[in-house]
Amino acid sequence: MSITIQFLVGVRNILKTLDGEALRDWLKVEPPLPQEYYDLAAELKDGYQNDDALLKLVESSLPEEDDIPEGQGTSWPGFISFMKDYLEYWRDVDFDSLLSAHQLLTALANSCATALNNPTYGTVMLQTGISICNSFTTLSLTLNKRPDLTAMLAAYHRGDEERKTVIETTAEIMQKFFTACLTDRSSPRYAQPTGKKLGIYIFANKTLKLLVMNNRSYLATQLLTNIMAKSPPLSYYPASQRVTFLYFLGRYHFNHDLYWRAAQCFQEAYMQTPPYFQKHRRIILTYWVASNFTMGILPSQALLQRREAQFMAPCYSQISAAVKKGNYIAYQHAIKQHEDWLRDRGFILFITLQWRIRPMIFRTLARRTFLLTYTPPAEGESRKAAVLKLADFKTTLRYVQKRLEGYLPATPAPKEPSANVNAYLLQAVSNSAGRGSRKSTLVPPPGGPKQLLASEGVLCGNMRITDHHVESMVMSLIGQDMLHGYIAHTQGVFAIMGTKTKGSPVAAGWPPVAEVILKRSVEPFVPGWVKDEPQ
C-alpha cells in the first residue's frame, strides 16, 4: 500500500470518529514535521502530477457513505475538494519560496473554509481550520514585510480588475471562517456556545489583527456589525480570546478617533489580564493611557509607577506635565524626544498624541494668560463680564512661537511676580521681538531662526500668528466646550459667562476638560462588544 493511500486511510478513520483534534494533528502544513510527511511529498511528486488522477485517488479512498451510525462521520464533497488541495499542497510546496508557499496555502485555506461550512460534519474541521489559519496568517505577515516579494505578487495580478494586498486577501479568507462559525445553529445565541460557534472570536481576532495592525481597520466594520447582530456574549469565551478581542476592538475604535469607546475596551482588557502577563498589560496600557489623554484624563503617578508602565512613564509623564501647565514648548520637546518610541508603538498613536492633545494645551495656556492679565473690576463695575483680551493671548502665542524658533531671552526674567510679571510677559512677546529692538526681551539665535516642520510650530511651522488665527483658535475651544463664553468681536475679547454661578471667572470660563468631553462622548454601549442578553 502506497504512503498516500495509507495517509488517506488514516484520515478516513479519523472522520469516522469525528475527532477534530486528531484530524488537526494529522493534517500538518508546516515544519517541524515527522519524516513521513516528506516521504508523502516525495511520492506525490513522483506519481501524482496529474490533478485528475489525484482527485480520483481521494474519491476512492474517502467515499461518501450512507446510513452512517449516530456519532460517526463520513466525507462530503467539500472535504473531498479540501483533501485534493491538501495533497496538491504537499506535492508542490517549497518552503524556501515564500511566495509559492503562500499561494498554495491560500488555496488550501479557501478550501478548508468551504469544508467547514458543511452543516452536518463541518464542525470536525474547526481545529484543522484554526491550525491552517495560524500558519496562513503568520506567512502572510512575513510576506507583507518583504516588499520585493509583494511587488512580484502585484505584478502577477496586474490584470485583475480589483487588486488586493496580501493582508486584504488573507483577512477576506479569515472572514469566511468567521462567517461559518457565526452562522452555526448548534446552540442559541444567548447560551453557552457549542460546535463551530466556539471559533467565532478566534477568527474574529485573527481578522482584526491583520486589518488593524496594517492600517486596514476600516475593512473590519462589517465583521463588527455581524458580531453585534448574531454573536453570543463575549463573556462566554475564554479569557485569552476576550482580552485579545477587546484590545483589537479598542485599536479599531482608536484608529477611527472614537476614544471613549477605545478607552472602555482597553480598560476592560487591562483589568482582565493577570499581573504576571507584563508584556500584554504594557501593550494594552500604552493605548489606554493614550485614549484617556484625548479625553483630558491624565495618568496618575501611581499608575505610571507600575512595572508594566516603566517604559512609557518617561514619555507620558512629560506630556501630562505639559498639559497641566499649558507648556506647549515642553509638549513639543516630549513628542520630539520620544518620537521613535511612539512610532514603534504605532503611527496612529504617534499622530494622535502629536495633534489631539494640542487643544487642551492651548486651553490651559489661555487660562494662564488670563490669570496674568486679568484685573478684577471695581465695585461699581461688578456687572461687567470678565474677559480675556485676544491681543494678550496672541502675545503669549507669539512668545511661544519665537521660543520654538530658537529665540532666547536677552535678559533674565524678573524674579518678583505681581505687577511686573504681566508687563514683562507682554513685552517679551511684542511684535518687535527678535527684530533688534531695545525693548524686546527676545533675541534671535545665532544663525537665524530655526526652520520648523509643519508639526512643530504653534500653527504650522514658522507661520506667523495673526489676530484671525487667535480668534479662530478661541472659537474652536468654545465649540469644543473647553471654554465657556463668547467672543465680542468689536472689543476683541473672550467674554466669560456664568461667573456668578461658578463663583470665579476661572471656574466659569475653563470647565474641567474631562467633564465636558465625557459628557458628549459616553454612549449606552460599545459597538462590537456583545454583553449579556438585554432584559
Image (spheres, helix red, strand yellow):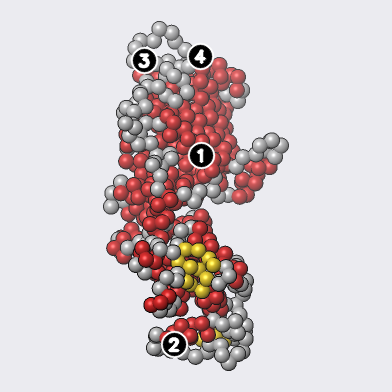
Cα separation between marks 3 and 1 = 39 Å
Q: Position of residue 59 (x, y in %)?
A: 52, 15
Which of 387/528 is in front?
387
In this view, the mark in front (1 or 2) = 2
Which residue in the protein does label 1 denote?
221
The local secondary structure at tag 4 comes to: helix
First in sequence: mark 1 or mark 2?
1
User: Residue 60: which disc?
Assistant: 4
Q: Do the residues bearing badges 3 and 4 touch, measured as CB atoms within 8 Å?
A: no
The local secondary structure at tag 3 comes to: loop
Which of 172/41 is in front?
172
Which residue in the protein does label 2 denote?
420
Cα separation between marks 3 and 4 = 19 Å
Asked if residue 481 is positioned above or below residue 155 in the image, the reply reads below
Q: Residue at x 56, y 40 (%)?
A: 168
Q: Do the residues bearing badges 3 and 1 touch, measured as CB atoms within 8 Å?
A: no
First in sequence: mark 3 or mark 4?
4
Q: Residue furthest right?
A: 159
Cα separation between marks 4 and 1 = 44 Å
The kind of residue tagged 2 is: Asn
The kind of residue tagged 1 is: Thr
In this view, the mark in front (2 or 3) = 2
First in sequence: mark 2 or mark 3?
3
Other residues around mark 1 within 10 Å, as few (<14) / some (14–19) / many (≥20): few
